[in-house]
Image (cartoon, rainbow, N blue to C red):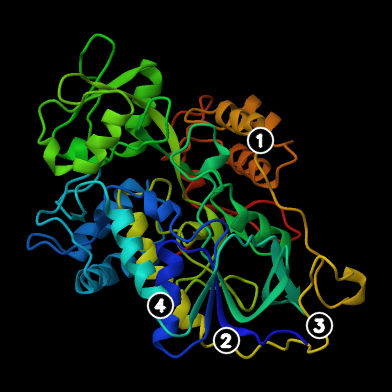
Amino acid sequence: MSEAPCDLLVVGAGAAGLTAALTAAERGARVLVLTKGHAPDSSSMHAQGGIAGAVGDDDTAALHAVDTERAGRELCRPSAVKVLTEEGPERVRELVALGVPFDPELSLEGGHSRRRVSSVEGAATGWAVTSVLGRLAARTEGIATREATTALGLWIDGGRCLGVVTPGGPIAARATILAMGGAAALWARSTNPVGQIGDAIAIAHAAGAAVADLEFMQFHPTVLAGSRLLLTEALRGDGATLLDANGDRFVDELAPRDEVARAIVRKGRAWLDLRAIDRSRFPGLMVEIEKAGFDPATEPIPVSPAAHYTIGGVVTDLVGRTDIPGLFAAGESAATGVHGANRLASNSLLECLVFGRRAALAALDEPAAPVRPETPPLSAATPVAAHPAAPAPPRERTASQELREQVWREAGVMRDPADLADLAGSPDVVAALVARFALARSESRGVHYRIDAPTADPAFEGHFVLRPGQDLKLEHWT
């Protein structure tokens, strides 16, 4: 006999997944959280700068929306921006009530017209938020967690998602939320944990879900050279400067990230000078810099861009619903259109909180899944053919160093169409999709920069979407 389906299966234990699980459990749902590694390790945990939200006396949701849309280069979905900025402040206040120890002063980051970023010790926000949410989930009745469990594919039957396929067999659920993070670790230079190679995109695409905006990978401009240690934008908000090899400033440090990243690439080498700022606001980060062998009090720190945030993903509506019944996505796995062509700094954790909650509420409205009692979970000792209704487990995706170097070289900060054409032939589905999308957008917009078309073209003011059985199509989302 198959184990009873849970009400909600959440794949991923970052901020979006934990928010979804807690939201559903508060309403009496039975929730199972799967995580590929160990529960604390997620992209959310490594997020430094903070959570954007109009909580200051001089700020409004409308001002936050203007900044978000300006950074998004005419491509943000207005309805998604409205949801994010209007619901965001309440989500931040809920974290305060849960005990997240935000700093007393709001931070300023690139692209923001106000100090609106709530942070913890300047650069420990992701760790603080996921720690609080994780501890709460661990003691919440109705939430169970399975670590070291990879979602190899989706269990689709009759056009509906019934759960996921794992190495131990299928896991059934009334509704499934993909909150698996993004694909930035496909690039050799990345701030993400090594497992973040776009699994949500891969399994959803294979199951027939639409994917969008995969040409847009945000590169964080200031990552410690030779490592994946991100040096938060809040440092530049406090007055840290970027210097070239001659010790001269060469860029507006608080310009949108895409502009700063390209300026550094053009210079070839760059250093972040922290000597004049109050480094005590960032105690944990200073310790990490010193561990890497640098003294931020006496010398500028070498930095270079790295792949940081996947703007595209599985297409959803404003409540996380995909076009496969029973399947939802939230956080970095989802493409809501909220970020447009360039994510505004610190909107990512906010996105997890806002849309993770919305996805959970919508998922609880799903009807009961018709799981056949004669279809037990597959195991290593159970022949697949004995259970034709259950899916056969595919192989787990991996990303070799060779692949990661190729993606960095051929789909990096500045892109050549000839390189993209080579990458489009990659056997890795996500790498190939990134190249296909980047070839289709023959302009430069936001984080996507084509050396053969260095300006934006109004003809491309839309979202490239790939739907089953169709070619890439430019859609306009309202």
x then y, percent, for residue 176: 59, 74
Q: Is any part of residue 293 visible from this angle?
A: yes
Q: Neighbour class for label 4 at 10 Å: few (<14), some, many (≥20)? A: many
User: Which residue in the protein does label 2 denote?
Assistant: 366
Q: Is any part of residue 358 visible from this angle?
A: no
**Residue extending farthest top:** 246
User: Which residue in the protein does label 3 denote?
Assistant: 375
Q: Neighbour class for label 3 at 10 Å: few (<14), some, many (≥20)? A: some
Looking at the figure, which quarter contains the N terminus? bottom right
Q: Which amino acid is tagged 3?
A: Thr
Q: Earlier in the sequence, mark 3 or mark 4?
A: 4
Q: Neighbour class for label 2 at 10 Å: few (<14), some, many (≥20)? A: some
Element assignment for label 3: loop
Which of the 4 quarters of the picture holds residue 273?
Answer: top left
Element assignment for label 2: loop
Front residue of this view, candidates 11 and 270 = 11
User: Which residue in the protein does label 1 denote?
Assistant: 400
Which numbered dot is residue 22? 4
Q: Earlier in the sequence, mark 2 or mark 1?
A: 2
- Residue at image point 14% right, 43% down: 281
